[in-house]
Amino acid sequence: MALMEISVIPIGTCSTSISKYVASSEKALKKDRSVKRQITAMGTIVEAGSVTKLFAVAKKMHEKALAAGARRVIANIVFDDRRDKKTSIETKVASVMNKI
């Protein structure tokens, strides 16, 4: 199961607040039941099965921020494509918490 961490960063807005643009990116995922996500203070963790699907999700989030009025968008993306065993957002967090 591939996971992605994405931060959509709108630039060229008239405000220092970016929550409006981030919310529009998140809304792009809301209706897609094949996408599991966890919003964090600095980005979103997405679980969607394949890297191909995650690329599509990243594109959708990026485009939604532009459609919301940002004149420029930077997206920081990190993929974790582990194929030797099944992982999920919860199992990765649990693994760390068990070691604390």
Image: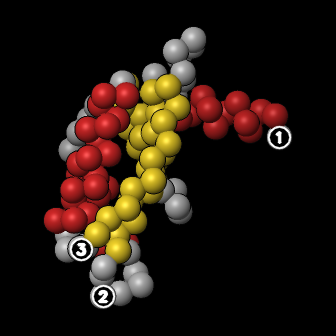
> What x and y, as percent, mark residue 46?
42, 40
Q: Which mark is residue 100?
A: 1
Residue occupying the far left of the picture: 67
The amino acid on which the numbered mark 2 sits, given as a three-letter code, is Cys
Q: Which mark is residue 64?
A: none
What residue does disc 3 label? 71
- Assess disc 2: are there few (<14), some (14-19) or many (≥20) residues with their C-alpha within 10 Å of its C-alpha: few
Q: Is residue 49 above or below residue 18?
A: above
Element type at mark 2 = loop
Tell whether 97 sits left or right of 24: right
Q: Earlier in the sequence, mark 2 or mark 1?
A: 2
Query: Do the numbered discs 2 and 1 sit on residues whose CB atoms are within 8 Å?
Result: no
What residue does disc 2 label? 14
> What x and y, as percent, mark residue 6?
44, 50
Tell whether 86 sits left or right of 67: right
Residue occupying the far right of the picture: 100
Q: Quadrant of residue 48?
A: top left
Element type at mark 1 = loop
The amino acid on which the numbered mark 1 sits, given as a three-letter code, is Ile
Residue 12 visible to an observer of this rendering: yes
Q: Earlier in the sequence, mark 3 or mark 1?
A: 3
Q: Residue at x 57, y 13 (%)?
A: 85
Frontmost residue, 15 versus 38: 15
Query: Do the numbered discs 3 and 1 sit on residues whose CB atoms are within 8 Å?
Result: no
